[in-house]
Each structure stands twice: as C-alpha cells, then as structure tokens.
Amino acid sequence: MIPNPIGFEKHDHSHCVQDAVAAADKKCRNAGVQLTPVRKRALEILLEEHRALGAYDVLARLNEDGYGSQPPVAYRALDFLTKHGFVHKIERLNAFVACAHPGERHTPAFLICTECHVVAEAETEHSDSLMGQIAETTGFRITRAVLEAEGICPNCLAKETA
Amino acid sequence: MIPNPIGFEKHDHSHCVQDAVAAADKKCRNAGVQLTPVRKRALEILLEEHRALGAYDVLARLNEDGYGSQPPVAYRALDFLTKHGFVHKIERLNAFVACAHPGERHTPAFLICTECHVVAEAETEHSDSLMGQIAETTGFRITRAVLEAEGICPNCLAKETA
DNA sequence: CCCATCATGTAATAACATAACAATATTGAA
DNA sequence: TTCAATATTGTTATGTTATTACATGATGGG
Ligand SMILES: [Zn+2]
Ligand SMILES: [Zn+2]
Ligand SMILES: [Zn+2]
Ligand SMILES: [Zn+2]
C-alpha cells in the first residue's frame, strides 16, 4: 500500500504552524526534553516553508530574531529537532525540512521538485520498503534510510504543458 | 524480486579494476566521449576500494600521480564519471563510489556500513521501486532517485556477536 | 591555417559543518 | 538552601565540501 504524499496541493497554512509547534512542545515535555525558544523558533521557520532550508538560511532568520549569529546556533537547534523527529535532513540538498507526519514513527521518503523546489514527504512502512527488503536478504541491519527523489512535481509539469 | 547486492563478501580484486576500466573505455568510445587519463585514473582509484571516497581523497591521489592539485581537477573527473554512470555519488557521505553494476541501466540503492565503511550497491527496478510507486500515485516525474541505507553490515554484525 | 570545442590547470571564494571553550541557566541531590 | 552536575547558548576558530572565473593547451572540422 502506497501512502499519499502531501505537499503539492494548496492548503490553509495559517494554523498548521501553531498546531505543529504545540504538538512538538507537548511531545518534548513528555520526553523530558526542552523545546527552548531558539529550537521552537527554528521549527517555526521550517514549518513556514514547504521546502528545505539550508542551515545558514535558518541561522540568518534566527539572528534576525535576536539569537546568535554563528553556525552552531543553527546546527544545534536543527540537530535537536532532527534527533527528535520534528525535522528531517534532505541529504541531496544539504538542507532541512519540517516533518509533515510528526508523531508517528516513520521512514520518510521525499520528492524534491527541481523547478519550484517544493519538498513533499511521503510516509513509508519501513518493513515493506524496498530498502527493508534488500536489507533482509543480505542480513544488513538498517539504522537509517535515505529515500529522496528529484524530479518535476505535478504542478510544474502542468505549467510546462500550458 | 530483490536483486542480490554484492560487496559484503570477499572476492578476487585484481582483475575487476582492469575489466571495469576496459568496459568504461569501450562505452565512452561508443558514446563519442573521451575517457582521458585523469578520468581513467579517477575511476581506477574508486574501483580499488569498496567504499566511498571524498573528492578531496581522490584529488590527493590524482595529485600523487602528477595531476593537478586543485579541487576542480577531482570534481570534473568525478562529474564526468557520474554523468556517464561509472560512478555514483553517495549523498549521505558526500563521497563517491565506483558503480558495481556498470553497463545496465539502473537505479542504484546503497547499503552503507557505519562500522567498516563498506558500501554495497544493489540494483533496483526503477518501476517497481518504492519511489517509483509513490511518484506514480502523485504524478511526480522522477529524474533521479537517492536510495541509501546506513547500518551494520553482516560481517560487522558477526564480529559483534563473537 | 582558423576557429570552435573540449580538456586541464590555477587562484579565489563560496557553502556547509564541527571543534573548542566561556558563560549562564536548570536540575536535582545533600 | 547550597552545591555540583548537566544542559543550553554563545563566540572564535577551523575544517570540509564544492563552485566560479579565468588562462592555457589539445583536438578536429572547415
Ligand atoms: Zn517525517
Ligand atoms: Zn514544482
Ligand atoms: Zn551502479
Ligand atoms: Zn561493516
């Protein structure tokens, strides 16, 4: 069964940021870790986009808001958010994107549009994924899977035709 | 059907480098492009390993052999080899590995051991891959797929147990 | 020969990421 | 409360990966 990725269709953006931050905050308290102001702000910055931002982009925006100006400020916040599953790193882009399916345990797969730079996240079942099957046949124990596809999104394809 | 990745078992290494270079050379002539000395040497360097090398590692070895010392020397050779399918970039590692299945058109999937750093390449059918299915359901046109799994290879798992 | 194309080389810089250390805040015993 | 351990934020400096720009030399067709 193939999950239905989101990200290509328009949607009401105003509340999803607040909701996601609130959910993250709750999850952090349950886990006994702190969603501090910088970390929260970094998450908000990524949630405001449906594309991946580089660490230095995030850093610049954090600095505008009065936080530090040096790379570790951004990298530490992003490390925290990534470690706790609120943010994913897109290896192909050396950039970060807010998780579109927070809460659930998942192995994310990404569709990256090279035209409009939107990044859509699809959920996958780790066990029935291709990598999982390969790992099974070879006895390889997977720690982390990177599944990223580059190409042209439906919106941009439509524009090309027009 | 899941292809059987290689790379975890020992094998005779002496001839596979020459064979692969010869095959690449032939393919280049057919395509009307040149496998020049630097490019050939870069390919050999990668073929001598079953792990990924960073561009600067390749650069250092090229320089030892009398080629230029500046980054573009390595990046250009690697770009050429990647473009023509003789080498793949491992995004997770920002590093390059010789293709283990040259000749055939394929969407490579990689298993990266975080212990011994071996990188195994499995062939996948683009169409029946997870990414392919996701793309189909969403109308996304895939240009390139990045499929990389990090974990522990069977050899290293065996050592842990011992 | 002349010109276009490709290939190689260098210098300079951009982009991405971490190490090391100082200062402050939080937490949780004693 | 007091104190020590831990966590957080900040800075400086450095390391690592990658590209831009430009000069030089080779190749090949007209
Ligand atoms: Zn996610
Ligand atoms: Zn697009
Ligand atoms: Zn390959
Ligand atoms: Zn291993």
Image (cartoon, coloured by chain):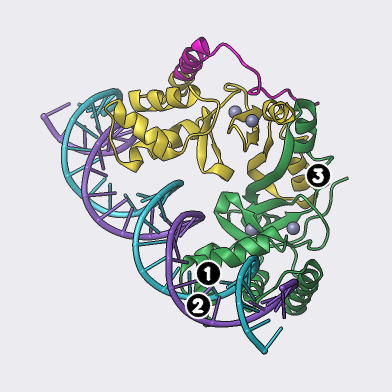
Chain colours: A green, B yellow, C purple, D cyan
Q: Is residue A55 left or right of residue A159?
A: left
Say if mark 2 contacts mark 1, CB within 8 Å.
yes
Rendered position, B117 above or below B100: below
Per the image, the residue denoted by label 3 is A126
Q: Is mark 2 within 8 Å of ligand 1?
A: no
Quarter occupied by the C terminus of chain B:
top right
Mark 1 chain: A
- Residue B2 visible (yes or no): no
Viewer-proximal residue among A140 and B90:
A140
The mark found on residue B3 in the picture is none
Viewer-proximal residue among A142 and C28:
C28
Mark 3 chain: A
| Residue A48: % across, % down | 66, 73
| Residue B3: % across, % down | 74, 24
Residue at image position (34%, 30%) is: B62
Per the image, the residue denoted by label 1 is A73
Query: Mark 2 or mark 1: which comes first in sequence?
Result: 2
Viewer-proximal residue among B108 and B121:
B121
Identity of the amino acid at label 2?
A: Asn
Residue at image position (63%, 42%) is: B146
- For mark 1, does the 10 Å Cα neighbourhood hold few (<14), some (14 to 19), or many (20 or more) residues? many
Range shown magenta: B1-26
Q: Secondary structure at mark 2?
A: helix
Residue at image position (59%, 50%) is: A91
Identity of the amino acid at label 3?
A: His
Query: Mark 1 or mark 3: which comes first in sequence?
Result: 1
The mark found on residue A63 in the picture is 2
Identity of the amino acid at label 1?
A: Val
Report the mark closest to the observer, 2 or 1: 1
Q: Residue A43: which quarter of the image?
A: bottom right
Mark 2 chain: A
Q: Secondary structure at mark 3?
A: loop
